[in-house]
Image: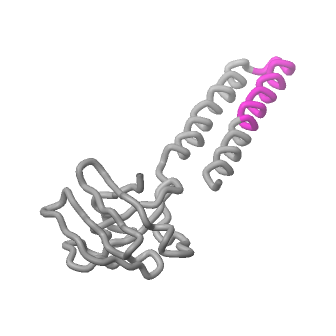
């Protein structure tokens, strides 16, 4: 829902930029001032619109998503050959890393505890509204490493 609001906002700003550019062009044309200035204002609105729309392409990551119940997290998360399955009975299976590991899982907010695992500070995040596991999370200012997305 958040990305839809951003999309609508960018569309409105883009339309406003084009309308202002066109109004400037018409004003300049009426006063017989340089047409190149009017054309420049219209052309200047194109990169502005491009910057606004390109912001939609950037990933939206929430490092502290709201998790109401642990049941929301149950499922299979993968990225290529690497995967983690969080089962309803509180067990997990991770494969595609150095070796297959299994054990028990639990969460406290967005922090994920996987017993008998090689992962450092695994964490639940959302990317573009989808649940993901960052098994080697090192903080929002550092790299997350691989990101496993729920299928």
Question: What sort of colour scheme is used for the picture?
Answer: one colour
Q: Main secondary structure of the magenta part?
A: helix
- Please state if 13 lies on the left or on the right of 128 as rendered: right
Horizontal and vertical percent for residue 29?
Answer: 81, 18
Q: Is residue 117 above or below residue 13?
A: below
Q: Residue at x 26, y 66 (%)?
A: 93
Q: Is residue 63 above or below residue 25?
A: below
Horizontal and vertical percent for residue 83?
Answer: 28, 57
- Please state if 116 lies on the left or on the right of 36 as rendered: left
- Please state if 19 lies on the left or on the right of 95 as rendered: right
The reply to whether the magenta stretch includes residue 18 is yes
Give, as a single range, the part of the protein colored magenta.
Answer: 15-33
Q: Nearer the viewer, residue 105 or 122?
A: 105
Q: Nearer the viewer, residue 135 or 71?
A: 71
Q: Is residue 32 above or below residue 141?
A: above
Q: Residue at x 41, y 69 (%)?
A: 124
Horizontal and vertical percent for residue 88?
Answer: 41, 70
Name the residue at the bottom extreme: 108
């Amino acid at each position: 829902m958040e990305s839809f609001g951003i999309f609508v906002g960018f569309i409105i700003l883009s339309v406003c930029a084009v309308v202002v550019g066109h109004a400037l062009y018409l004003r300049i044309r009426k006063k017989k001032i340089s047409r190149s200035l009017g054309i420049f204002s219209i052309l200047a609105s194109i990169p502005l619109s491009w910057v606004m729309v390109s912001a939609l392409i950037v990933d939206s990551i929430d490092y502290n998503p709201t998790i109401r119940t642990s049941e929301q997290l149950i499922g299979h998360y993968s990225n290529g050959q690497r995967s983690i399955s969080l089962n309803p009975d509180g067990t997990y299976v991770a494969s595609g890393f150095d070796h297959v590991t299994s054990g028990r899982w639990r969460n406290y907010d967005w922090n994920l505890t996987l017993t008998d695992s090689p992962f450092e500070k695994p964490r639940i995040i959302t990317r573009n509204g989808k649940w993901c596991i960052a098994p080697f999370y090192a903080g929002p200012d550092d790299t997350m490493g691989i990101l496993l997305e729920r299928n």
